[in-house]
């Protein structure tokens, strides 16, 4: 019979096993910092490669309740004053059932595990049957091999303070030196401590970032509430954050976005968040001013400047001196006025109509448009230099489709306001609120507000259900419905707009024709005006002259 070869401490096979264990553990650490993954697999490899069975990591009860890196901030005197030996429990194991792990709880200083945790000294039990302090609590002795079983327990430290114990069983009579196993276990215990500390550091940083994000979100929400802007969606908070960052600047702000996204509210927020908040805020709708009145409206006029100018009048820019002027629908401003506005922005002065002296004004300009001004520049309908002057700080306002999580809050706000204004008590069922969140809202916040107002005034129910809400929602085009003949045979393109528009008397179109144009184009004044050969300003002027300027166009 061939003699049995005995493996010694210098046996290359054992060294290869140790290196394989270390490389696999480090590979796991490189892929994940989760202790439940790395530490359990480390205990598995200890068993498979080195024969160190039923490995377990016991952690003090305070681990997980406080950040581990906080131990580094405690002075030696504080450590001495701390509880001398905490209770502990098995947190990670391999080769133990859940029931056996649950039994692995140790009081302060109790058993071999408790002593290691209390004294910070490793303990090697050569024979568990001969050691009265060995409790055999997790695994009954009858469940272990009949051979002599050793037990190795080493402290796990973080910043020189013991937080746990790495322990395992080992058959005593083996062809491998016990000291070699202890050396490997010391390395693994150190690695376990560093991994736990690193995880705690990451968790603490994550908590700090989450807390900071919550503070910033609350600050933005507070700012939004102060400005009357409702919502907490990321897109809205991003726009508010940009607004806050430029609030103290004097550069022009250009608000971009679809119609009905709340540009006037944002313009007022720019004013309220600045040092000019106690000064005038003047809003001007450029689409509602006739071409012939633009200059006198913006810059004022002197007495006798034109027939009927019995007294001098300060224009909107003078009235906004030291404050903010909001130029809404800036894309509708005629080219001649664009030149004069550019001069005012560059030099900070205005000249009244019929006047000869310059008047200095300190005004911050906030402009807004739902048009693509860059395209208008290319088309020659908007001055390039004015576009660059206004586009210093562009802020894009999100559409309601990008703020679906705000729809519920906005709907309830409009509902409360309309109920109070009309002495009603209408509520929305959860299904109705969910349906509002699903709607496309091409008209954005303005359309939502109109739907809620219409619902409150026309419903007979105290609680509006999802089904009843449907009759108040604008109906979208059914994709299965064939398009109208006009869509199948589109009209030829309209001729280019003449450089000089033909004169049109204020009574050129009857009220019924204006209303029908609005109806045909879904309340869009720009398209309605275009269909009648009018500018938006001319169209709005005729509505106003005929007493139709308050008509709800949505």
Image: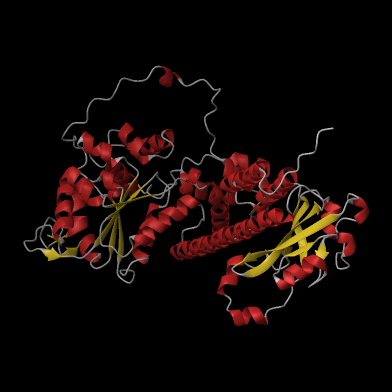
Q: How many marks?
A: 0
Q: Position of residue 537 (x, y in %)?
A: 28, 44
Q: Position of residue 469 (x, y in %)?
A: 62, 43
Q: Residue at x 40, y 44 (%)?
A: 258
Q: Is residue 105 visible?
A: yes
- Please give left or right for residue 189 compared with residue 522 in the image: right
- Spot the residue most to the top: 489
Q: Position of residue 102 (x, y in %)?
A: 83, 58
Q: Is residue 461 visible?
A: no
Tell me if residue 455 comes above or below residue 61 in the rendering. above
Q: Give whichever of 373, 189 is nearer the camera.
A: 189
Tell me if residue 106 comes above or below residue 283 in the rendering. below
Q: Which of the 4 image quadrants contains residue 110?
A: bottom right
Q: Residue at x 61, y 43 (%)?
A: 435
Q: Give whichever of 481, 207 is nearer the camera.
A: 207
- Please give left or right for residue 44 compared with residue 71 in the image: right
Coloration mode: secondary structure
- Spot the residue most to the left: 356
Tell me if residue 363 comes above or below residue 77 in the rendering. above
Q: Give whichever of 237, 506 is nearer the camera.
A: 237
Q: Give whichever of 506, 96 is nearer the camera.
A: 96
């Amino acid at each position: 019979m061939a003699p049995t070869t005995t493996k010694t401490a210098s046996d290359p096979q054992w060294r290869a096993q140790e290196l394989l264990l270390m490389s696999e553990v480090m590979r796991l650490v490189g892929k994940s910092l989760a202790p439940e993954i790395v530490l359990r697999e480390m205990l598995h490899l200890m068993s498979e490669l080195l024969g160190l069975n039923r490995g377990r990591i016991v952690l003090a009860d305070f681990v997980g309740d406080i950040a581990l890196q906080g131990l580094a901030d405690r002075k030696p005197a504080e450590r001495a004053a701390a509880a001398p030996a905490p209770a502990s429990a098995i947190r990670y194991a391999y080769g133990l059932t859940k029931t056996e792990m649950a039994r692995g709880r140790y009081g302060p200083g109790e058993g071999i595990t408790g002593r290691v945790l209390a004294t910070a000294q490793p303990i090697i039990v050569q024979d568990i049957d001969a050691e009265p302090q060995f409790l055999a609590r997790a695994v009954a002795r009858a469940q272990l091999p009949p051979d002599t079983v050793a037990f190795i327990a080493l402290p796990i430290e973080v910043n020189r303070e013991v937080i746990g114990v790495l322990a395992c069983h080992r058959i005593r009579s083996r062809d491998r030196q016990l000291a070699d196993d202890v050396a490997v276990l010391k390395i693994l215990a150190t690695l376990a401590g560093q991994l736990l500390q690193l995880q705690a550091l990451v968790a603490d940083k994550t908590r700090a970032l989450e807390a900071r994000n919550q503070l910033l979100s609350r600050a933005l929400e507070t700012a939004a509430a102060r400005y009357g802007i409702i919502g907490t969606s990321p897109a809205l908070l991003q726009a508010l954050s940009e607004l806050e960052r430029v609030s103290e600047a004097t550069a022009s702000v250009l608000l971009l976005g679809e119609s009905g996204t709340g540009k006037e509210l944002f313009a007022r927020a720019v004013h309220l968040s600045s040092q000019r908040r106690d000064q005038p805020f003047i809003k001007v709708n450029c689409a509602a001013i006739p071409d012939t009145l633009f200059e006198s409206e913006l810059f004022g006029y002197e007495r006798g400047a034109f027939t009927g100018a019995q007294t001098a009048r300060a224009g909107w820019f003078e009235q906004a001196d030291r404050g903010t002027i909001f130029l809404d629908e800036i894309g509708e401003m005629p080219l001649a006025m664009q030149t004069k506005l550019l001069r005012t922005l560059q030099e900070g002065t205005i000249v009244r109509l019929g006047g000869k002296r310059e008047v200095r004004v300190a005004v911050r300009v906030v402009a807004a448009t739902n048009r693509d001004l860059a395209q208008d520049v290319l088309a020659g309908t908007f001055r390039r230099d004015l576009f660059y002057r206004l586009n210093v700080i562009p802020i894009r306002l999100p559409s309601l489709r990008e703020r679906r999580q705000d729809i519920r809050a906005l709907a309830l706000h409009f509902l409360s306001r309309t109920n109070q204004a009309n002495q009603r008590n209408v509520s929305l069922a959860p299904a109705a609120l969910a349906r509002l969140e699903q709607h496309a809202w091409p008209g954005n916040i303005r359309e939502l507000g109109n739907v809620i107002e219409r619902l409150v005034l026309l419903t007979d129910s105290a609680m509006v259900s999802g089904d009843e809400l449907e009759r108040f929602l604008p109906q979208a085009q059914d994709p299965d419905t064939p398009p109208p003949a006009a869509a199948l045979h589109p009209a030829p393109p309209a001729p280019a707009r003449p450089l000089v528009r033909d004169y049109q008397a204020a009574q050129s179109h009857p009220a019924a024709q204006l209303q029908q144009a609005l109806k045909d184009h879904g309340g869009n004044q720009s398209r309605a005006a275009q269909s009648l050969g009018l500018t938006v300003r001319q169209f709005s002027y005729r509505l106003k002259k005929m007493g139709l300027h308050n008509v709800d166009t949505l």
